[in-house]
């Protein structure tokens, strides 16, 4: 019996060693042509006390970004049931068209930025079935309104919808499939992105649902253990781990993997605009920005969206610290960066 147990643990050890070697050792080929974009949230810009339209135009004009992922909050669009406010979104799409930029439109209830799920107040008193019916109606309104806009490159259904992070009423894989099916039935010409945690998920679950797999890439963050206690840590995952997982997804499903969130802003113990600049710099500064960009290049992926462009503009405009913003400009203005 002892010998059997010993052999079992030996085999388990060999398996995990082989797994570690597969995902942690190697150097992926660096892509010559990399697409760089940014994530933009009107809500985040306003939370930072910025003029959101001025910020958006600066992204298009001064920064020179030609690829933008729009995080649209449901509660901002349908604050009153069956009454839709699209003026701000219309403006963002029209400006993107003017500057010949391409958009990823994130729609659903979990669309990024805390608390992740952005729910209208009237939503809370409904049953789960009623909530899902209303969400599908909202998605239909959005897709029908904007599907003829050439500047929209992809739809993204929710934001990390199977990753339990944020304040959300439920997580439902079967319903996610309904959302994607609805989007594709209304707009069969566009692919649908479904995203997942880059570090804490194998990506297989979402790859079976969407047309494109979107992943995150966070390098230095604050981790909460209990109230008032936590620590900063740097991710242990090397660039090759992203390449290997993307390769595995490709072999199993034929789906492309892109990075829809590359960290270029702080991740502190609370919203970074409530902590000092010194504290913010523990997880993001010019040196860390450069490290994150270089790390991204080494993953072998060829499309990245910078998460935190609003913060960079906030530093520039509110604190007279344009260094990171100016460094980011090189990505969009210099093909040899």
Image: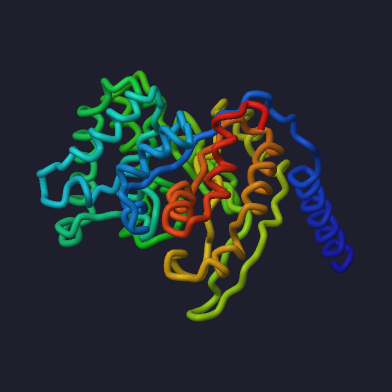
* 293 relative to 288, above or below: above
141 lies left or right of 255: left
Q: Nearer the viewer, residue 39 or 13?
A: 39
Q: Position of residue 12 (x, y in %)?
A: 79, 56
**Location of residue 61 in the rendering, given as x and y in whole percent from the top left corner:** 42, 32
Residue 47 is drawn in which quadrant?
A: bottom left
Q: Residue furthest bottom?
A: 228
The image's colour scheme reads: rainbow
- The residue sitting at 37% across, 58% down in the picture is 48
Quarter of the image with the N terminus is: bottom right
**What count of labels does the image hold?**
0
The residue depicted at 54 percent of the width and 32 percent of the height is 332
Give the answer, above or below, for where 26 lies relative to 13. Answer: above
Q: Is residue 169 above or below residue 179?
A: below
Residue at 55% from the left image edge and 79% from the top image edge: 229
Q: Residue at x 52, y 78 (%)?
A: 226
The residue lying toward the viewer, choosing from 72 and 166, is 72
**In the figure, is residue 70 to the left or right of 35?**
left
Residue 331 coordinates in the image, percent (x, y): 58, 34
The quarter of the rendered structure image containing the C terminus is top right
Q: Residue 292 placed where, x, y %? A: 64, 47
Q: Is residue 25 left or right of residue 124?
A: right
Q: Residue furthest right?
A: 3
């Amino acid at each position: 019996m002892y010998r059997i147990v010993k052999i079992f643990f030996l085999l388990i050890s060999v398996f995990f060693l082989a797994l570690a070697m597969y995902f942690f050792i190697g150097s992926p080929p660096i892509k010559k042509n990399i697409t760089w974009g940014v994530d933009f949230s009107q809500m985040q810009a306003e939370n930072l006390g910025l003029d959101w339209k001025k910020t958006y135009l600066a992204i298009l004009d001064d920064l020179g970004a030609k690829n933008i992922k729009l995080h649209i909050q449901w509660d901002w669009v349908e604050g009153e049931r069956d009454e839709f406010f699209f003026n701000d979104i219309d403006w963002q799409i029209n400006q993107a068209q003017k500057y010949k930029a391409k958009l990823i439109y994130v729609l659903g209830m979990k669309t990024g930025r805390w608390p992740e799920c952005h729910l209208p107040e009237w939503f809370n008193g409904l049953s789960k079935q009623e909530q899902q019916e209303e969400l599908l109606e909202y998605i239909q309104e959005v897709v029908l309104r904007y599907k003829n806009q050439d500047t929209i490159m992809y739809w993204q259904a929710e934001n990390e919808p199977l990753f339990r992070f944020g304040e959300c009423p439920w997580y439902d894989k079967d319903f996610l499939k309904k959302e994607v099916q609805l989007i594709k039935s209304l707009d069969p010409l566009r692919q649908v992105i479904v995203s997942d945690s880059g570090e804490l998920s194998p990506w297989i679950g979402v790859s079976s649902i969407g047309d494109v797999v979107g992943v995150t890439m966070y390098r230095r963050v604050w981790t909460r253990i209990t109230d008032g206690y936590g620590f900063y840590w740097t991710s242990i995952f090397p660039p090759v781990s992203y390449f290997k997982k993307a390769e595995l997804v490709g072999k199993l499903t034929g789906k492309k993997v892109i990075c829809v969130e590359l960290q270029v802003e702080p991740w502190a113990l609370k919203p970074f605009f409530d902590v000092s600049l010194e504290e913010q710099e523990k997880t993001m500064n010019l040196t860390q920005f450069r490290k994150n960009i270089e790390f991204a290049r080494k993953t072998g992926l060829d499309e990245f969206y910078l998460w935190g462009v609003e913060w960079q503009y906030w530093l520039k405009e509110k604190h007279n610290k344009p260094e990171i913003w100016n460094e980011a400009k090189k990505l969009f203005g210099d093909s040899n960066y």
